[in-house]
Amino acid sequence: MTAATRIEIDEAVSALAAGRLVAFPTETVYGLGADSTSDEAVARVYEAKGRPVFNPLIAHLPDLAAAERLVVFTDAARRLARAFWPGPLTLVLPRTADCPVSLLASAGLETLAVRVPDHPLALSLLRAVGRPLVAPSANPSGQLSPTTAQHVRDALGNKVAVVLDGGPCRVGVESTVVDLSGERPVLLRPGGVPAESIDAILGPLAMPGEGPIRSPGQLESHYAPAAAVRLNAAEARPGEALLAFGPTSSPALNLSPAGDVVEAAANLFSYLRRLDRPGITAISVMPIPEHGLGRAINDRLRRAAAPRPGSAS
Ligand code: TXA
Ligand code: MG
């Protein structure tokens, strides 16, 4: 770690100890971090994002041992943690009796979501601060998640004490969320760990559609640019901006000319931002295959295209 980074982390630790918000990079997207053990700091996260208070937050830890102090692990949960942490996987588990994390982060549920991010700056910060940090994606609620420090400064700059800059996020879509608090594991959000990789360890996961809504993050409209979004487009209609995928003769911005879903995930949010200009009628997106990270990409695109709250349709 450079001396400059050390100074920035010290600054971030002081801000967090004072109950202020710190944005930091993870391998997935930038997080809006706060001291999870302080009700006031956690409340500030909801306020800064304009996030509905019924939508719970993820506690971020430096390692599995730290996570075991907050939630009760099952065998299956431990197997997943050993396979994918640090990495883009979030586990929802029952809170321990003496869990120090603010109940606000659980939003009235008996469970807490936990994850160990795979980013050197995030891990240094978590170790230095010595307590779990809640960190939703560092964007106003409903909008696109940030994959660069500049995205955070643009949207929430006046609400955070420090923005740690780790460059563009490697994965580009949020963590996969698996609920292990019930009888069967349920995939609550497809994300950076492909569902196929989890199936390989636990057997096939139940999909959230198969039961009642268990994650408030399953709300329809989300991850939305200002422009409308049209899916499975072959080409742009007049007035639209095309977001291409795979080999094509189109000069449009292309998520992955080679047709690689991993590359496409890393580019997704920043390319949507680039095309989100006033005056266009919609961003039209070419089809993305529904395998690997393609599932997370299509989940985000479907929500970006869903009817917006307050819109007529
Ligand atoms: O990759 C990520 O997970 C990023 C980075 C910053 O770590 N964070 C992130 O947080 O995406 P957020 O708050 O934007 O999304 C958290 C998701 C939401 O869909 C929320 O509803 C769900 O996790 N969640 C959190 N706690 C839960 C719980 N106890 N039960 C069910 N779902 C939960
Ligand atoms: Mg989010």
Image: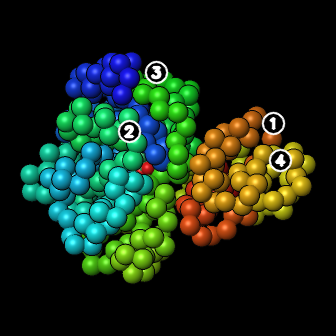
- Which residue corresponds to mark 3? 158
Circle 3: residue type: Asn
| Relative image position of residue 43 (x, y in whole percent) | 30, 36
Q: Can residue 224 be seen in this view?
A: no
Q: Which residue is drawn at 65% across and 54% down?
A: 264
Of the pair 286 and 105, the residue shown nearer to us: 286
Q: Which of marks 1 and 2 is in front?
A: 2
Classify the position of the C terminus by image quarter. bottom right
Q: Nearer the viewer, mark 2 or mark 4?
A: 2
**Mark identifier at residue 252:** 4
Counting residues from the start of the chain, the first of labels 1 and 2 encountered is: 2
| Relative image position of residue 308 (x, y in whole percent) | 61, 51
Label 3 to label 2: alpha-carbon separation? 25 Å
Counting residues from the start of the chain, the first of labels 4 and 3 encountered is: 3
Label 4 to label 1: alpha-carbon separation? 17 Å
Classify the position of the N terminus by image quarter. top left
Outermost residue toward the bottom in this view: 203
Label 2 to label 4: alpha-carbon separation? 34 Å
Label 4 to label 3: alpha-carbon separation? 34 Å
Secondary element at image label 4: loop
Q: Residue at x 60, y 70 (%)?
A: 291
Q: Nearer the viewer, mark 4 or mark 1?
A: 4
**Mark identifier at residue 279:** 1
Counting residues from the start of the chain, the first of labels 3 and 1 encountered is: 3
Circle 2: residue type: Pro
